[in-house]
Amino acid sequence: MKKNIYTSIKDLAQLTQFIFTSQSMYTKASPQVIGFLLSTYFDDSSRLLTITDNDEKILACATLTFPERYPEVAFLGNYELPVNTLNRSAIKKELFSLIENVAKENHITKIIGPINFNTWLGNRFKTSTTNKDYAWEPLNPKEYVDDFTSEDFSKDMEYITNYYKDSNRLFATTEEK
């Protein structure tokens, strides 16, 4: 296995196909949409981290973003490690080791994640065991939660998805009294 750190997305086609195949995003998206989102949100403050096999095939990936406003914080996102991957545990350890090393090299004392493509909605994993999927709710495999908690990440907040058949009722909950 090889550990790779990129300051730009070199092979967008391979990366988007890998993420598309993992498909733990909020809604099903084509490789073209995934590529657009990655290229839109990946900038000079981001690092793409991948674990590849000897043939350069991506086995796992994540991004770290270092926001200028918070010099001791990194945002960890775009985490993908397919559940059916051979040697999954070893690959996960390699990826999180790489994440930790890159964070230390950049004097980071706090990593916040998971965050995918945006920071106002995507900073969460689905943790319930329900099989129902709601619009804009994460579709991650349940193993992703275990991946993070086994690497000493702790839960910061909990969210509850509510479904309203009557959108007027939903809107009424947002009106000022």
Image (cartoon, rainbow, N blue to C red):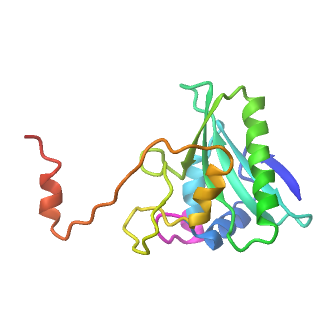
Looking at this rendering, what residue extends furthest in the left direction? Answer: 177
Residue at 34% x, 56% y is 160
Q: Is residue 59 magenta?
A: no
In terms of image quadrants, where is residue 37? bottom right
Q: Nearer the viewer, residue 50 or 129?
A: 129
In terms of image quadrants, where is residue 144? bottom right
Q: Nearer the viewer, residue 129 or 144?
A: 129
In the image, residue 9 sits, relative to residue 105, either above or below, namely below
Residue at 56% x, 65% y is 142
Q: Is residue 169 left or right of residue 52?
A: left
Q: Is residue 26 magenta?
A: yes
Q: Assign the magenta stretch its main secondary structure.
A: loop
Is residue 112 visible in the rendered structure shown here?
yes
What range of the chain is rendered magenta? 25-33
Q: Residue 70 at what x, y percent from top left? A: 56, 26
Q: Is residue 159 left or right of residue 102?
A: left
Quarter of the image with the C terminus is: top left
Quarter of the image with the N terminus is: bottom right
Q: Nearer the viewer, residue 89 or 62?
A: 89
Q: Residue 119 at what x, y percent from top left? A: 48, 44
Residue at 57% x, 63% y is 34
Is residue 6 visible in the rendered structure shown here?
no
Residue at 42% x, 45% y is 120
In the image, residue 110 sits, relative to residue 174, either above or below, namely above
